[in-house]
Image: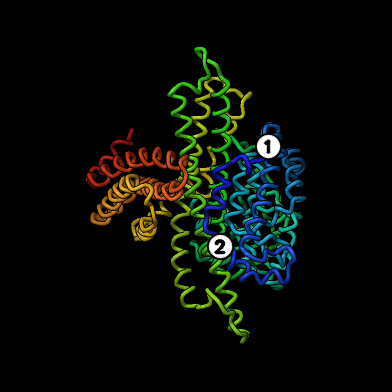
Amino acid sequence: MSNFFTDNTDLRQTLHRLDLARVVRLREDDYAQARDFAYAPRDFEDALDSYERTLEIAGELAGEYIEPRAEDVDRAGSELVEGEVCYAPGIAESLARLKQADLMGITLPRKYGGLNFPVTVSVMIVEMISRADPALMNIFGLQDIGETVNKFADDEMKAAYLPRFASGEVTASMALTEPEAGSDLQNVQLKATEQPDGTWRLNGVKRFITNGCGQISLVLARSEEGTSDARGLSMFLYERDEHMRIRRLEDKLGIHGSPTCELQFDDAPALLVGERRRGLTTYVMSLMNGARLAITAQAQGIAEAAYRAAAKYAAERMQFGAPIAELTAVKGLLADMKVSIEASRALMYETALIVDTKEALEHRIARLQAAEKAGERLPDGPDTDLKTLRGELKTYTRLAALFTPLAKACATEMANKVAYDALQVHGGSGYMRDFAVERHARDARITNIYEGTTQLQVVAATGGILGGTLAARLDEYDAEDFGATPDLLGKVRAARARLTESIARVRELDDIRFRDFHARRLTDMAIDVSCSYLLLRGAQDDARRLLAAEYFVAAATARVEGAAAQVVGGDPSVLDALNALTAG
């Protein structure tokens, strides 16, 4: 039997290698939830066992049921019939299986029917489903909509909608993008008008909306008359009715099983989520960060599928009297793929743990504040000092804001390269639709575009790189015990020193053009150095991981050296030539 969890040693080991104990304890209210819910864990070992069992179920569904349908889903795509979207049969069937497996409310609280699992476990499930069929993941992964409602809506809205998300009764979409507002969301023009009864009406067009046919949409709209910036935008919950029309489905390069819709809202009734004016600045940023981590996992899954397809083909394809896997050039390609996947996975789950810690701290602070307000006795034990928790939350909020774009940039660019190289291993056969690798190459291409292009991830990460957040985290990594790999640690430290020089050069010049021109290099260096430390961490007692770390660090240090030479040796005056170089 094919199981995408049990057949992935790196993923299985990641679950046990990550230090999730505190996160789980905070999410489970020091395991007090076990008194109210029979299926809540009694301790960390119980929780870990539950996570592993669930991952095995999801892995079996991905390998045995979803992946065999992926090719038919890609060929069938979605259809718009009399104003309604018809999923490919495999999508509908797989969604039904996921619903039966109780996997539609992974991170939602138990009181709404969710599993209350950490983000890290959710990301693992998304990675496996994406390896099977990334188009399905685009629908399944929109559970972030429910999580946003849980974070920011009032109790009445949560009670009305979250059980429907958790049960799989509804699917969802986030309706943000418009014809003139893609990356520049502060330019959103879709209008929201308040009604005398306190509800709102939406009018306008949304474009490129993944699963725009979903029953529930979170819609970013302009609620403040006369505004033109982010402060005039609010978030609304809309449930499908006759006041929204799907005008068309986009004809796309890849992920054909995921419908991408253009929507027309005509006086559509909606409910305000949270507070007015915070739609973009607070709610969309939270929603987008969750979505970016999901796309990171999607890219990771596609890369895993592409690598495995290439390795299988190379082992079976005979040329010159031997499998092409025996050719050094092919071996090199496969090694590059495998190690880059493991490095990216290490960064992705480090990011997931950071996000989990941030959200667990938010949960604990909210619980303590509620107890304090009600005049109740605060719980005894660790993590009960509000001042300390707030300081820690501030740190982890900054870390999440840095590592989320780093992880997305790393995984999505990696997935594109791995899929490209996997197709190359297949040669001419890979260009044909007889092999899944051409689908992987098409599917990978969107990952470094949607939910913020790589260029936007660079913009998002630059502040944390230049401002000291990255340096503080790298200091923590450097202080860990790497006694089994002193020579490798020396090489990583040398690479970090070159990154530090580059950051200092950009700060010293204080030139916006120079900073923007080299921001991608700084981001790539930050990724390489971070991944090097993380791979070293896993190599202390594992010979296979040590080999992977040595291979990655050798390539990463060379890349960092080359990028640093351009930044440290660069001069802003060279940028004057850019207009001339791109003219004509």
Residue farthest toward the bottom in the current orientation of the protein: 375
Mark 2 highlights which residue? Answer: 21
Compared with 481, 37 (above or below) is below
Residue 509 location (% of width, % of height): 23, 54
Looking at the image, which is closer to me, 360 or 450?
Answer: 360
Q: Is residue 256 in view?
A: yes
The amino acid sitting under disc 2 is Ala
- At mark 2, the secondary structure is helix
Labelled disc at residue 527: none
Labelled disc at residue 2: 1
Q: Is residue 567 left or right of residue 550?
A: left
- At mark 1, the secondary structure is loop
Residue 212 location (% of width, % of height): 66, 49
Q: Residues within 10 Å of mark 1 (few under 14, many from 20)?
A: some
Looking at the image, which is closer to me, 536 or 552?
Answer: 536
Dividing the picture into quarters, in which one does residue 146 lie?
A: bottom right
The amino acid sitting under disc 1 is Ser
Q: Is residue 463 in view?
A: no
